[in-house]
Amino acid sequence: MSAPTHQITLTVNGETVSETVEARKTLVDFLREDLFLTGSHVGCEHGVCGACTVRVDGAVVRGCLMLAAQCDGARVETIEGVSDGGEIADLQAAFEKRNALQCGFCTPGMLLTAQELLAGGGVPSREKIREHISGNYCRCTGYQAIVDAIEAVAMARAGGEK
C-alpha cells in the first residue's frame, strides 16, 4: 500500500517549486532530499535542537516539526537563500572572526535565529541574545563566542563598532 501524497507549490529561496510529497514528509526532509538544500540539518527530530531551522512566511520555524504539505502556498527561506542574498553576510563574517562556529552543524540555525533577533533593530542585551538563541544547541563553542558575534553585529548595525 502506497503512502498518501499531496501536490504542493511553494516558493523556496525565491523560486517556485511544485512537487508531489508524501503526506508525512517533514519540511526539512523535503528540502534536503527533494531539493538538495542541505544547509538545514536533521538533529533531534523533536524540535528541540534548532539544527533544522528555516523561515516560513518570514517566521523562524523548526523544519522537523512542520510537514512539507503544510507549506503549500508558503514562502520558505533556507540558509542557502538567506546567505546567497547577502542578508546575513555581516553575521557570517562575525561568526568566523570570533570563532563562533566549529563543526558547523548548528551554525545555519543559529544564524537564522540571530538574524530574527537582530531584525528588530537596536542592540539587545547579552541576556536577551542568550535567551533568543536558547533553542539552538551547540556542542562545540560554549556559546560565549556566538553571543559575542551577535552582539558585535547588533552594535555595528546600530552604528557603533565593537
Image (cartoon, grey):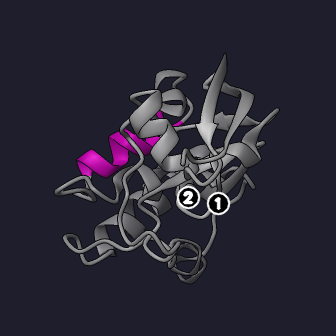
Q: Position of residue 150 (x, y in %)?
A: 47, 59
Element type at mark 1: helix
Neighbour tally class for label 2: few under 14, some 14-19, many 20 plus, Cα within 10 Å = many
Spatial CA span between label 1 and label 2: 6 Å
Residue 160 visible in the picture: no
The residue positioned farthest toward the top in the image shown: 15
Horizontal relation, residue 129 to residue 116: left or right: left
The reply to whether residue 100 is visible in this rendering is yes
Highlighted magenta segment, given as a residue range: 88-97
Q: Position of residue 87 (x, y in %)?
A: 57, 32
Residue 57 drawn at (x, y percent): 78, 42
Is the stretch drawn in magenta largely helix, strand or loop?
helix
Q: In the rendered image of this protein, does residue 161 appear above or below residue 42?
A: above
- Establish if 14 lies above or below 22: above
In the rendered image, the quadrant that contains the C terminus is: bottom left
Q: Position of residue 97 (x, y in %)?
A: 25, 47
Q: Which residue is mark 1?
A: 117
Q: Residue at x 63, y 29 (%)?
A: 20
Could you tell me the amino acid type at mark 2? Thr
Disc number at residue 113? 2
* Residue 73, magenta (yes or no): no
Label 1–label 2 contact, CB within 8 A = yes
Q: Residues within 10 Å of mark 1 (few under 14, many from 20)?
A: some
Q: Residue at x 54, y 32 (%)?
A: 82
Q: Which mark is residue 132?
A: none
Report the front residue among 15 and 83. 15
Q: In this image, 96 relative to 154: left or right?
A: left
Kind of residue indicated by mark 1: Leu
The outermost residue toward the right is: 73
Q: Foreground: 90 or 51?
A: 51
